[in-house]
């Protein structure tokens, strides 16, 4: 015996460890078969017009799911992002021919220059590059 442990206790511990590993593998197999479908959309390469200013850049993208719509826009001197449930966007109008969406977001906006939050209203005009992205985005609001 070394340091107060006997051989039997070591064998039991090894047996318990191997047993835990087997149980864990079984639980992972069960999780793989029960995966939910991925309803998230990520769209980039958009042209966003916000309150009369055009934003065409790499920072323009939309990430959306049935519970949340996240719009990010970026220009040479200004960038920002808004998010909310699809029901929080008002005056949503779809133009199927031009692949355009017009919508209004209103809520609390953090002004980094003044270091204050204020209620603002932002009018978005979003032009999609691909028909597939436009249709997926439209399905969230219908």
Image (cartoon, helix red, strand yellow):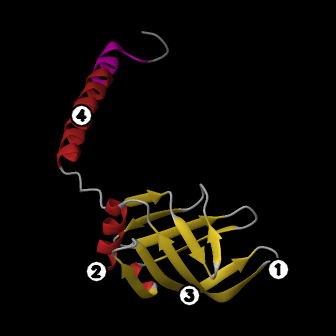
Please provide percent x and percent y for residue 45.
50, 57
Q: Is residue 7 magenta?
A: yes
The vertical placement of 9 against 99, above or below, is above
Q: Is residue 83 left or right of residue 22?
A: right
Query: At 44% from the left edge and 59% from the top edge, which residue is drawn?
Result: 43
Query: At 59% from the left edge and 54% from the top edge, which residue is drawn?
Result: 58
Q: Is residue 118 left or right of residue 89?
A: right
- For the residues labelled 1 and 2, the Cα–Cα distance comes to 38 Å
Residue occupied by mark 3: 106
Quadrant of the image for the N terminus? top left
> What mark, if any, has residue 114 been given in the picture?
1
Q: Are marks 4 and 2 in contact (CB under 8 Å)?
A: no
Q: Which of disc 4 and disc 3 is earlier in sequence?
A: 4
Name the element at disc 1. Answer: loop
The quarter holding residue 6 reads top left
The quarter holding residue 73 reads bottom right
Q: Which of disc 2 and disc 4 is earlier in sequence?
A: 4
Please provide percent x and percent y for residue 129.
43, 60
Q: Is residue 90 magenta?
A: no
Q: How many marks?
A: 4
Residue occupied by mark 2: 142
Query: At 49% from the left edge and 69% from the top edge, which residue is drawn?
Result: 70
Q: Which of disc 1 and disc 3 is earlier in sequence?
A: 3
Residue occupied by mark 4: 25
The quarter holding residue 57 reads bottom right
Magenta-colored segment: predominant secondary structure: helix
Name the element at disc 2. Answer: loop
């Amino acid at each position: 015996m070394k340091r107060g442990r006997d051989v039997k206790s070591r064998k039991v511990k090894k047996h318990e460890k191997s047993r835990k590993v087997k149980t864990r593998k079984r639980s992972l197999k069960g999780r793989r078969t029960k995966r939910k479908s991925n309803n998230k959309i990520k769209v980039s390469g958009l042209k966003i017009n916000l309150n009369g200013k055009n934003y065409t850049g790499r920072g323009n993208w939309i990430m959306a799911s049935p519970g949340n719509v996240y719009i990010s826009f970026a220009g040479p001197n200004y960038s920002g992002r808004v998010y909310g449930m699809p029901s929080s966007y008002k005056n949503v109008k779809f133009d199927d021919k031009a692949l355009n969406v017009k919508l209004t977001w209103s809520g609390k906006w953090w002004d980094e220059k003044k270091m204050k939050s204020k209620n603002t209203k932002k009018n978005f005009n979003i032009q999609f590059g691909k028909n597939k992205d436009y249709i997926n985005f439209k399905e969230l609001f219908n």
